[in-house]
Amino acid sequence: MKIHNFSAGPSILPQSVFDKAAQGVLNLDNSGLSILEISHRSKDFIAIHEHAKALVKELLQVPDTHHILFLSGGASSQFFMVPLNCLPQNGTAAYVDTGSWSSKAIKEAKRYGQIDVLASSKEDGYKYIPKNYTIPSDATYLHLTSNNTIFGTQFQSFPDCEIPIVCDMSSDIFSRPVDVSRFGIIYAGAQKNMGPAGVTLVIVRNDMLGKVGRDIPSMLDYQVHIKGDSMYNTPPVFPIYVSMLTLEWLKDFGGVSAIQKANEDKAAILYDEIARNSLFSAVATEEDRSRMNVTFLVNDPELEKPFLDLCKAGGCDGVKGHRSVGGFRASIYNAMPREGVEALISVMQQFEKQMG
Ligand SMILES: *Cc1c(COP(=O)(O)O)cnc(C)c1O
């Protein structure tokens, strides 16, 4: 039976990417060598790295003002690298607290300067995206988390502001078009929507850097990585390779506008079923709900385990909600086909029949 993987991350990748990655492990492009053993300075890997960067640039239309880096340390390292590199000791950065990941980013940033938390939906279980706050024009940057992987909310648009936006896009990068020119920094761990765990994409605008006058360890210094073209040290070769394959798949799919349509369609049919089905209710406020991570509860908590059992029997894996929210979470990233979502919907309908 085909297993549909709804895991929040590491998560589903296209089958064709698994096939090509497996081939690359055995014999990369008929070189007689494995992607796992070649030098990061080899001609083959340099071509892979250049192609991966070119695909990021093309798919997101990254302007020439922005550098594209592939770093290690996860999105979590960006929580401190951003303020370390960009926030002067006497400066202030503005943050919006929309979930666990943004609150972790806030915690780390506080080590490096003044942090102004403009708004938070914490008191309401992060069920919505705060609006109507004032963005201070003298702050160094505004930090947002575009999609809240755990609670299932998402910025449908980004606030207008004069200061640069820094955005953690770990769980919705490449899921829709974004105007990169509006962002000072975009960062994303690969393992939700771009590739396997082990590499983090960072897109950083020139003018964000060189202003803090702080002694930054080389490995944590964006300028060192820019100068070294992500090869100051050994880069995560295999995750970059698989990310390149995934971005090729996305390009063949028609790019981010085409995948956005598919993502909206998948999310719509699933949210419609949650609304229709008498057993379930959605977690996130309708206007802010995520197209990537669909969170929902069963009205009777006693039914949680039986539903998860039925999901398993129906070939739907990874539907259990995050421990801080409970209930269920279906992560329907780019690589999740409509048939996967339809399979989950049919399990929900079967469950309603059984219980009703
Ligand atoms: C998963 C996730 C992270 C953490 O990523 P790591 O690569 O594990 O450090 C950060 N932010 C968001 C929005 C995430 O979804």
Image (tube, rainbow, N blue to C red):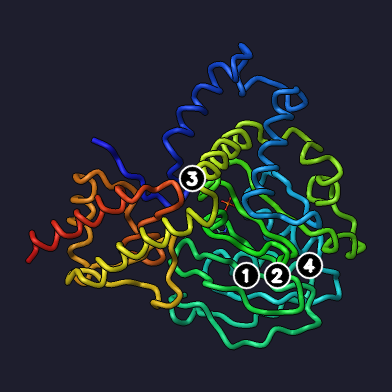
* Spatial CA span between label 4 and label 2: 18 Å
- Image quadrant of ligand 1 equals bottom right
- Which image quarter holds the C terminus? bottom left
Task: In the rendered structure, find residue 112 and report the number of the disc placed on it.
Answer: 4
Q: Report x, y in % for residue 124.
A: 44, 81
Give neighbour class at mark 1: few <14, some 14-19, many 20+ (Cα, 10 Å): many
Nearest to viewer (mark 1 / mark 3): 3
Amino acid under label 1? Leu
Q: What element carries label 1?
A: strand
Residue at 51% x, 21% y: name it.
Answer: 23
Q: Which of 179 and 324 is in front in this view?
A: 179
Pointers 3 and 4 in contact (CB under 8 A)? no
Q: Tag 1 or tag 2, which sits nearer the N-term?
A: 1
| Disc number for residue 253 | 3
Q: Residue at x 84, y 40 (%)?
A: 228
Q: Is residue 171 something one can see in this rendering?
A: no
10 Å neighbourhood of mark 4: few (<14), some, or many (≥20)?
many
Q: Is residue 168 left or right of residue 152?
A: right
Say if mark 2 contacts mark 1, CB within 8 Å.
Answer: yes
User: Which comes before the other along the chain, label 4 or label 1?
Assistant: 4
Q: Earlier in the sequence, mark 3 or mark 4?
A: 4
Mark 2 highlights which residue? Answer: 165
Q: How many circles with numbers are drawn on the protein? A: 4
Compare residues 254 and 18 and report the one nearer the observer: 254
